[in-house]
Amino acid sequence: MMTTLYNPLVNGFHPDPSVVRVDDVWYLATSTFEYLPGIPIHRSHDFETWELIGHVATRPGQLGVEDVPTAGGAWAPTLRHRDGVFHLVVSDAMGRGMLHFTATDAAGPWSDGASILDVDGIRPLDGIDPDIAWDHDGTVVITYSGLILDGPERGRHLGIQQARVDLDTHRATEPVRSIWSGTGGQFPEAPHLYAHEGRWYVLIAEGGTERGHGISIARGDRPDGPFETAPHNPLVSARSTIRPVQNTGHGDLVVGPDGHWLCVLLGVRPRSMTRAFSALGRETFVTPVRWRDDGWPEIDPVQLSPRPGTAREISFDVPLDREWIAVRALPGQVARVADGRLVLRGTGATLDDPRPVFVGRRQEHLTNEVTVDIDVSSGTGGIAVRYDERFHVEVEAGDGAVRARAVVAGLVQEWRHEIGSAPMPLQLHIASRRPEDAGGLARTSDVFHLAATVGGERIELAEVDGRFLSSETAESFTGRVIGAYAVTGEVAVTRWRVSGSDE
Ligand code: 6LW
């Protein structure tokens, strides 16, 4: 069987991938920050087709994201499997801290999540990006990035840290120690430990999650080192190259179909004259790995190889599928499906609020078009593309008007068109299209076209430069999420059409 390695492997906001093979099935986990449900689990039987089978955090309280600041929440899981149990460790940044979840079925339900405590059993280990590995005697080794996010030492980085942990008490059995922390790049993070042919390998990301990102490796005889750095680090980095997939780093190794090793990792697809703006944020990619005769792995640069475009129509006479996410709340807490309608009840909170009444889906394609049928006869609301509460673009209806609005770091521009008491439903449209051809000199990623169709007449409300909703401009760890929202009263969506492509 020849595997086609599609890249992106999983489109749209899916950073920090971790993958595990169980027999001939692969499971993949990614970060979700302040969105819920948290930490999607995708499953594949061939490494080509990935199905979203569930999430780790599906109940209030498993993650403390209800109250985390923007960019906090579920960061960088590691997914492993041992003796019939799935283990997932993750940092709930500025929330509950470092956590360990288990499940017998990766689709869930997952456990409540236990804090991984220091040797005194008082505080969670201070850091991010935990890895879980088992030494040959069965001892659990937790390796993580010592970036301190809370308290007086906030911002300090202690490099890669490690401790053995007793999973019965979730307490470290020894003080943490520093291990190999890369070749000197900033933010050594995302460690993963592997036992392979008699040696232990520690794979890490370094250089920061932006253009300098990369993956480096070292090896030793024991899981705690000492480690010898590979002669050819970094194994992966797109920095200073013209490759279409940039920021490649934060990876995890796995044996793929046919026994070939693969590395799943994050990357972005920046566009514009200087490849400056990544509309969708950090996505999951995959690339081949080969073990050399000298016992070091080699990792290929990531090749862009997008899947064909998609077109979907979503109706609301069945429960919401798993792709819907909400901000600091579960989708069911802000929206309900009734009588073929997706109903949202406004609380007065707008999209500028950290807790908007909003449910959305990731934008999966660079060129994308969403049209919804919406009834705003008893409320105001609409559809929006959201990075966070300071960066969003929307088309809103209600109070006798349709309005396009762009909110960019507190700057607001609005375009308004009176419609009086128009017949319901209306159609609202948000498209992300390629900028006009400027001979390779287009100075943005894409352009939003914001429109409404009222009584059969299409009203083009505005065009907005797409760069304002890119991970670089928003300085965001997440990506574009397109959803429906309500501000006041009741807003009902009856049809959702989305299509897109990556050509
Ligand atoms: C994550 C760190 C990183 O914890 O960004 O790219 C942080 N890597 O490893 C948030 O995703």
Image (cartoon, rainbow, N blue to C red):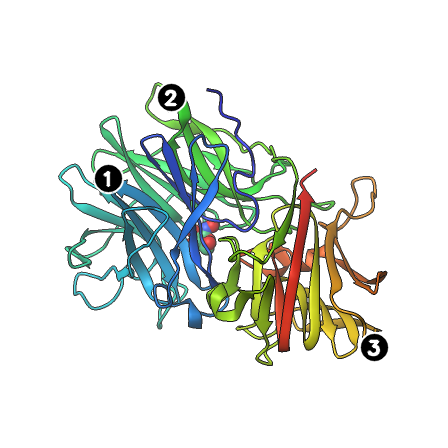
Q: Which-is-in-front pick, marks 3 and 1?
A: 3
Instruction: Residue at the far front: name it.
Output: 339
Q: Residues within 10 Å of mark 1 (few under 14, many from 20)?
A: some
Q: Residue at 66% x, 73% y: name it.
A: 410
Percent x, y of residue 207: 48, 47
Q: Residues within 10 Å of mark 2 (few under 14, many from 20)?
A: few
Q: Is residue 49 left or right of residue 176?
A: right
Reading the chain from its start, which is encountered first: label 3 or label 2? 2
Mark 2 → mark 1, Cα distance in angstroms: 21 Å
Percent x, y of residue 174: 15, 55
Secondary structure of the residue carrying numbered label 1: loop
Residue at which label 1 appears: 226
Q: Residue at 75% x, 61% y: name it.
A: 427
Q: Vertically, is 48 above or below 105? A: above
Residue at which label 2 appears: 292
| Mark identifier at residue 27 | none
Q: In the image, what residue type sits under mark 2? A: Arg
Residue at which label 3 appears: 420
Q: Which of 256/294 is in front?
A: 256
Reading the chain from its start, which is encountered first: label 2 or label 1? 1
Image quadrant where one finds the C terminus: top right
